[in-house]
Image: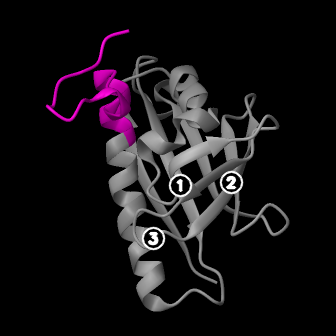
Amino acid sequence: MNTDTASVTIERSAEAVFKFMSDPNKMDLWSFGTWRISVDDDGLVHGRSIFDGSIACVRIESNAQNRLIDYWVGANSENLAPRIFVRITPGEVTGSSTLNCILSMVSFRTEAMSDDRWHRLLTAHAFEVQLIKSLLENDFDHREMTSSGTTQTS
């Protein structure tokens, strides 16, 4: 089994990043595997891959004390496996500031995953952590953009 880790330093507190990454309603801001999501009352996320339209279900299991988040992923709610996890490490752990943290996303490759699919996942996660950084540091929500490129106001 292969694993991969994509990491980035984010200029936000570990608590703020943990809250963002634990929120199922935020997944379509950053996850290419769960685009245009719906979230059940029990928190199960239903989405589609931006790459091929395949259906994905995700259940988020978070541990606030350790700032760990498991993403249980599968094609349906009956076959979820904890294939992706995130750790948020406060800046002071690495000798930095409490105003930043490190987000690390770890992925497990399944035996059935082709080389092309695995490469696509690695590329997506490397980009996703950069997107998460940008979203949080700029307080930006692309879902609020209009077709003319302006931001909707509520």
- Quick one: SS at disc 2? strand
Q: Which residue is mark 3?
A: 121
Most foreground residue, 91 or 12:
12
Question: Between disc 2 and disc 3, whose residue precedes?
Answer: 2
Crowding around mark 1 (Cα neighbors within 10 Å: few <14, some 14 to 19, many 20+) is many
Most foreground residue, 9 or 50:
50
Instruction: Give x and y (percent) for residue 111.
Output: 66, 89
- Quick one: SS at disc 1? loop
* Distance from Cα at disc 2 to Cα at disc 3: 15 Å
Residue type at tag 3 = Leu
* Distance from Cα at disc 2 to Cα at disc 1: 8 Å
Which residues lie in the magenta part? 132-154
* Dot 2 and dot 1 residues touching (CB under 8 Å): yes
Q: Which residue is mark 2?
A: 58
Residue 104 highlighted magenta (yes or no): no
Residue type at tag 2 = Val
Residue 101 shown left or right of residue 22 in the figure: left
- Quick one: SS at disc 3? helix
Q: Residue at x 53, y 25 (%)?
A: 14
Q: Which mark is residue 34?
A: 1
Crowding around mark 3 (Cα neighbors within 10 Å: few <14, some 14 to 19, many 20+) is some
Q: Give the colouring mode of the picture.
A: one colour
* Dot 2 and dot 3 residues touching (CB under 8 Å): no
Q: Residue at x 57, y 86 (%)?
A: 113
